[in-house]
Image: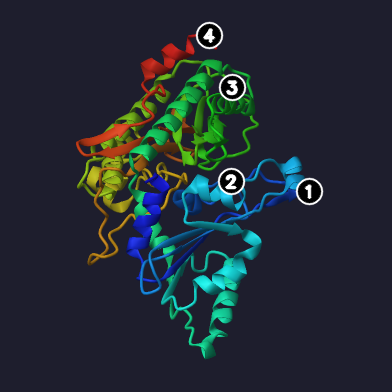
Amino acid sequence: MTAHAARRAALLARMQPGSVAVIPTAPEVTRNSDCDYPYRHDSYFYYLSGFTEPDSMLVLRAAGALGPARSVLFCRARNSERETWDGFRHGPEGARLACGVDAAFPIDELDTHMAQLLADAPAIYYALGSSNALDAQIKLWLHSVRGQARSGVTAPASVHNVLGLLDEMRLLKDEGEQAVMGRAAAISAQAHARAMRATRPGMREYQIEAELLYEFRRNGAQFPAYTPIVAAGANACVLHYSANDAVARDGELLLIDAGCELDGYAADITRTYPVNGRFSAPQRALYELVLAAQAAALEAVQPGRPYEGIHAAAVAVLARGMLELGLLDADKVGGVQDVVANKSYLPFYMHGTGHWLGMDVHDVGAYRDTGAAGKPSRALQAGMTLTVEPGIYVRPGAGVPEQFWNTGIRIEDDVLVTPAGHAVLSGAAPKSVAEIEQLMRQEA
């Protein structure tokens, strides 16, 4: 059984007997005139099918009174004229063989088949409320089935959100997923190293971004997993900076947050380094503080420990460092425990220390145990993948030492929770002061 077939079976086992699940892929989107944005499949659909063509839908019927479990794929029919313009299509028969589903039909026949598949099904599962178009389509199908009531046919009596089931499944990565994510992280780490070697004072941020994108594609990655952030100097204090057009100047730090997408899985790495290849003393002090915070956070990545412990570990280190470096005045904010309790660190560290990572950069899955009283932070489990990314961002301000002004630093790695602890998937990206400075002395 393929990985996609196993996932379909696992979802079917979680559904009400005889019920039907509907999972469409993403639509094509027009960019302007007759040009579309580069197509990217829906993650849930791909997770269950491995199919990347648009205009497709997967329908699953759980085993029950109507018979055994069944998987049906709807996709575009073969069309020689359109294939001349747009490329190869599998067609229903090719898709059935490629995806290992029980049956496949042209997408144009979807409405007819859905009226049959939903007949006498007790429930329907889909991404409730996620798409007005899908909601309307489901409503029409249910209306069609209800129209057969005089023939003794019953329509689904309940509707369930399928995403809750799929989110929990996607949160734990199997060996195949872990391998792809490891490769995506390795490619992204190479890209960060390439950018470091290429950087020189006077370059524009987009020139350095081009080095990243080249390395991604050169190694087989299909896309950047998100719009890269290449932020020099004060731009690094803008968390979601995206202009990438400023000049990287001598004496500034450069923050790069970039990762590739490989075979549907994302990497997400951030490195910060000096444009001229040498950290100044103030830059080094802040950088090593963030590096120490990340080391503490990584130690908290252990199976059985709470997810929120990662952030708590990073904040404790950052709070102490902010006091020691004079970013915070102990006479005004108190000691480390006071800084943490009162969140006095927020002007310099305003985001969390990571997120789930997988098919989506900010991947699916709950961060809290919603089934327990008080909804505590969920425990980490082997097979989870996440980022660990503390940072510090110092803007000009009263009482803030001027030597730190306009400095933004973030260090982010991709991490797999293992039975024994954790593995850093992106460890090949240079991170220590010595590694970075040595690399940047080399020729690009």
Q: Residues within 10 Å of mark 1 (few under 14, many from 20)?
A: few
| Residue 425 x/y as whole percent | 36, 31
Q: Residue furthest bottom?
A: 150
Q: Which residue is mark 1?
A: 34
CA distance separating discs 3 and 4:
19 Å
Which of the marked residues, 2 or 3, is nearer the chain's N terminus? 2
CA distance separating discs 4 and 2:
36 Å
Residue 443, numbered circle: 4
Quadrant hosting residue 141: bottom right
| Circle 4: residue type | Glu
Quadrant hosting residue 383: top left
Residue 40, numbered circle: 2
Which of the marked residues, 4 or 1, is nearer the chain's N terminus? 1
Q: Residues within 10 Å of mark 3 (few under 14, many from 20)?
A: some
| Residue 396 x/y as whole percent | 50, 37
Residue 249, numbered circle: 3
